Image: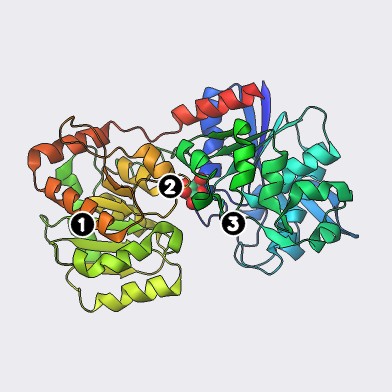
Amino acid sequence: MQNVLLTASECSPFIKTGGLADVIGSLPSALKKVHDCTVSVILPLYEDSNINQQEVNFVAAFNVPVGWRNQQAVLYKLIHNDITYYFIKNSYYFGRKGTYGYFDDGERFVFFSRAVIEAIPFLSFIPDIIHSNDWQTGLIPAFLKILQPIADVKSVFTIHNLQYQGAMPANMFYELLNVRDEHFFGMEWNGLLNCMKAGIFHADLITTVSPSYAKEIQYSYYGEGLDPLLHDLKDKLFGVVNGIDVNEFNPLTDTNLYKNYHQSPQDKKDNKKYLQQECGLPERSCVPVIGIVSRLVEQKGLSLVTCMLHEMMQEDVQLIILGTGEPSIEGSLLESLQQYREQLAVCNYFDEGLARRIYAGSDFFLMPSRFEPCGLGQLIALRYETVPIVRETGGLRDTIVPFNEHTLEGNGFSFTNYNAHDMFHAIQYALDLYRTPVLWHKVLQNIYTSSVSWDQSAKTYQSLYEKL
Ligand code: GLC
């Protein structure tokens, strides 16, 4: 039996800013289902972590070297839904509001990565595999190779988003790391200390969250500058598409919805009516509703939407957008509200309940991402029987098959190039099919049979772990 220790900077239900938290929150039980293993998770304990302090048990207090200083870490343990979670507390680094965005984020996660290594003797098992995720835990594979805290331990490093790399001035290597100069090479990129590079370089196995993204990041358009390294290491780079927790996301039981449903376009229409009401749009059951639930940032392709908004609004369609992000994108969407009051709703905040009602009440879910390592929105949309319209990139390409009128295959609509008119044409085609009942019925049938659970991917992780 293998002992797997999973580590990341966020994990549902304790702390979440994005899809990483959903993945770390749902992967352990999926792995346990298919694999003879124990999976534990180790996380930072943030001031904002959603944890009842009474429920956690003290395990140990120990010192963590950070350059010439020692910082104290306190290790806590919590069993939740049969999974053991460890938390590392240090008030100086994590006793702050929010999760990221501080000037010393680099140092905070160097501390956390080293603290995970120092915590190993206090865990109730000896890990066979330490699986870290994204730059915040990128130094863990490096510390494992360099400090060798346990013989024979193997490391897996998963890239969820290559854009954020945890790069710091090179002198931080000397200020924070306590390793010999010769190790700078494996952590340096373009003259900076780079935590993402450290993870990629030292891990025994690298994965990313879809097979297409694993290929894309070997080329400069998607490689965020690290493409030559990823290309060199391609033999240890694999793509495993994310799943979602199908119990957590279930239109039949979701208490946020106006009406629960399963394969019933009629019940879905009732949700649409309520959604239109909630968003202040005319309640018209025949008008197609396009939903967007997204961080409003460049990665997500929102500039294609702002660029084509006026053309889109010439169609008989309603567009509902939920999310926060870059002021220029938010501002441009809000500006158009006045002009299209009957067709456009922009909710520039985040509300999980409304997000679920958008997934349930929309006919289409739009994700025109510039790049998308996996994307969970399109999977949730499929689960809520809403038709995705996506750009063919990364995980969107691997999970959404464009509908083909001749073979009648496909569970969505897509376009290839990052081009606003191409997106618009895909939307127009999707709207045409919406008005062609025989074909629309077929699209829905294909959605009902699309798989979005972890089952297959958990098996793939299992085989990668076994390979190690
Ligand atoms: C990041 C990626 C997203 C992916 C998620 C979970 O947020 O941008 O595509 O689904 O991580 O892996």
Q: Secondary structure at mark 2?
A: loop
Q: Where does the N terminus fall, quadrant-wise? A: top right
- Spatial CA distance of label 1 from label 3 is 33 Å
| Mark 2 lies within 8 Å of ligand 1 (Cβ measured) | yes
> Few, some or many C-alpha atoms within 10 Å of disc 3 (few <14, some 14-19, many ≥20)?
some
Q: Secondary structure at mark 3?
A: loop
- Disc 3 target residue: 164
Does label 3 or label 2 sit earlier along the sequence? 3
Could you tell me residue 184's position as x and y percent? 81, 50
Q: Nearer the viewer, residue 31 or 463?
A: 463
Residue 230 tag number: none
Q: Residue at x 68, y 28 (%)?
A: 3
In front: label 3 or label 2: 3
The amino acid at mark 2 is Gly
Q: Is residue 385 left or right of residue 144?
A: left
- Disc 2 target residue: 375
- Disc 1 target residue: 289
Q: Is residue 389 left or right of residue 10?
A: left
The amino acid at mark 3 is Tyr
Q: Where does the C terminus fall, quadrant-wise? A: top right
In front: label 1 or label 2: 2
- Spatial CA distance of label 3 from label 2 is 16 Å
Q: Nearer the viewer, residue 41 or 413?
A: 413
Q: Residue at x 53, y 45 (%)?
A: 217
> Few, some or many C-alpha atoms within 10 Å of disc 2 (few <14, some 14-19, many ≥20)?
many
Q: Is residue 308 left or right of residue 56?
A: left
